[in-house]
Image (tube, rainbow, N blue to C red):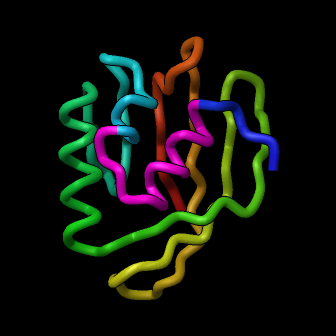
Amino acid sequence: MNMPSPVKAYFDADQSGDASALAEAFAADAIVKDEGNTYIGRDTIEAWWSAAKAKYGPVAAPLEVQPHGEVIKVLAEVTGNFPNSPARLTFAFKLAGAQIEHLEITQ
């Protein structure tokens, strides 16, 4: 599956449970939107991801990658300790150079 390197770094870090590597894939002022909440900045994103990992133990396995102009959409199967697991979610990434500038996770 052909993914831009920052997107691959995100999923690799997610699967290995490496919070700092995941945060490093993001630009310093990046934005993540997930479950109706917005997280701004690398430290906040790392805290959001770490809290979700601790509570639900989710792991995202990419199924397909679809470029849409400036946005790269990745359909992933997410498994973990939450109702209706596994779930198929769309991760919509916008990149700024070699880092993630924006990520929105939706069903």
Q: Is residue 106 left or right of residue 36?
A: right
Q: How many marks?
A: 0
| Residue 79 magenta | no
Name the main secondary structure of what is drawn in magenta: helix
- Residue in the picture at 60% in, 70% down: 77
- Residue in the picture at 30% in, 39% down: 20
Q: Position of residue 28 (x, y in %)?
A: 31, 17
Q: In this view of the protein, which residue sits in the foreground, 89 or 64? A: 64
- Residue in the picture at 81% in, 50% down: 1
Tell me which segment is drawn in magenta: 6-20
| Residue 19 magenta | yes
Q: Is residue 61 left or right of residue 56?
A: right
Q: Position of residue 23 (x, y in %)?
A: 34, 35
- The image quadrant that residue 56 belongs to is bottom left
- Residue in the picture at 50% in, 26% down: 100
Q: Position of residue 93 (x, y in %)?
A: 57, 35
